[in-house]
C-alpha cells in the first residue's frame, strides 16, 4: 500500500523457513526474488534500475546477507538501495533458539555467515532503522551496523529510530509524528531516481 500510494510498484516476497532451510537459504531467496523483479518489473511499470529491497526483522538479515555475500547473488539480482529494519546482522554464542535453527549450533561458523565484513564494502545506499521498543539486542545490532558502516570506506547509512514496532505496515504509516519510515524511504527513493536524470 505504501508503494502504491506514492506511485511506485511494490512487490511482496517471502523466504523459506528454518530449520528445513538453513543459512544461506534466506539470502538466496532474496537473490532469486530480486532477479525475478529485475527481469519482470517493466511489465508492471517499474524500473529495473530503481529496485529498493526492504527487509524487516529476519528479512533484514536476509537482505543484509544478500548484500554482504556477492557469491550468493544471481544474475541481474543487484538492487539500487536497501532498507534494513530491526535485524540481527551478526549472530553470537548467545544466539536464540530461532537463530540456531537457521545458522546451526556451531558458533565458530557465525563469523563467516555474518553480514560483516562484506556489508562494509558495498556502495549500495542503506536506510537503517530499529525501534526504540525493540529488545536491547536488536537495538545494539542496529547501532553496531551503523557505527561500522560510518567508519567504513563506503558510506554512513541514513538512520531512523522508530517509536512503533508492531508490524512492517505500521512502520510505513505516513504520520510524520510517529517517526515512521515513510519519509526517509521516500528520500532514499528520490536519491535513487535522481541517479538516472541527465
Image (cartoon, rainbow, N blue to C red):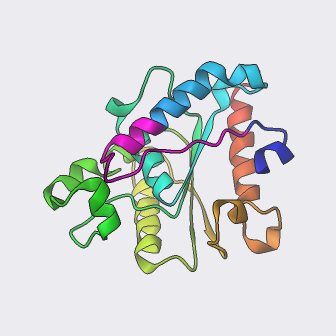
Above/below status of 117 relative to 40: below
Above/below status of 134 relative to 10: below
Residue at point 35% right, 33% down?
Answer: 72
Name the chief secondary structure element in magenta.
loop
Residue at point 72% right, 20% down?
Answer: 42
How far from the left and from the top, in percent, is residue 107? 17, 61
How far from the left and from the top, in percent, is residue 171? 69, 64
Above/below status of 151 relative to 16: below
Q: In which quarter of the image is the C terminus?
A: top right
Above/below status of 40 relative to 72: above
Residue at point 81% right, 68% down?
Answer: 176
The answer to whether residue 77 is left or right of residue 127 is left
How far from the left and from the top, in percent, is residue 92? 25, 66
Residue at point 56% right, 25% down?
Answer: 36
The image quadrant that residue 106 belongs to is bottom left
The answer to whether residue 45 is left or right of residue 137 is right
How far from the left and from the top, in percent, is residue 18? 35, 53
Q: Is residue 4 magenta?
A: no
Q: Which residue lies furthest to the front in this view?
A: 20
- Can residue 67 be seen from the camera position used here? yes
The span picked out in magenta is 10-29
Is residue 147 or residue 160 the one in the foreground?
A: 160
The image quadrant that residue 163 belongs to is bottom right
Q: Is residue 21 magenta?
A: yes
- Can residue 197 be seen from the camera position used here? no
Count of residue discs? 0
Amino acid at each position: 500500500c505504501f508503494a502504491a500510494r506514492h506511485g511506485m510498484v511494490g512487490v511482496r516476497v517471502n523466504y523459506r523457513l528454518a530449520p528445513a532451510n538453513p543459512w544461506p537459504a534466506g539470502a538466496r531467496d532474496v537473490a532469486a526474488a530480486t532477479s525475478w523483479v529485475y527481469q519482470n518489473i517493466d511489465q508492471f511499470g517499474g524500473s529495473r534500475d530503481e529496485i529498493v529491497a526492504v527487509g524487516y526483522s529476519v528479512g533484514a538479515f536476509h537482505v543484509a546477507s544478500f548484500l554482504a555475500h556477492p557469491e550468493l547473488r544471481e544474475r541481474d539480482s543487484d538492487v539500487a538501495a536497501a532498507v534494513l529494519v530491526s535485524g540481527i546482522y551478526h549472530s553470537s554464542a548467545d544466539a536464540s533458539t530461532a537463530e540456531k535453527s537457521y545458522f546451526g549450533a556451531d558458533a565458530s561458523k557465525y563469523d563467516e555467515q555474518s553480514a560483516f565484513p562484506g556489508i562494509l564494502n558495498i556502495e549500495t545506499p542503506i536506510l537503517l532503522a530499529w525501534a526504540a521498543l525493540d529488545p536491547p539486542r536488536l537495538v545494539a545490532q542496529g547501532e553496531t551496523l551503523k557505527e561500522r558502516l560510518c567508519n567504513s570506506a563506503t558510506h554512513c547509512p541514513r538512520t531512523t529510530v522508530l517509536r512503533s514496532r508492531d508490524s512492517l505496515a505500521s512502520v510505513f504509516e505516513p504520520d510524520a509524528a510517529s517517526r515512521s519510515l515513510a519519509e526517509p524511504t521516500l528520500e532514499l527513493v528520490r536519491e535513487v531516481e535522481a541517479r538516472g536524470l541527465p
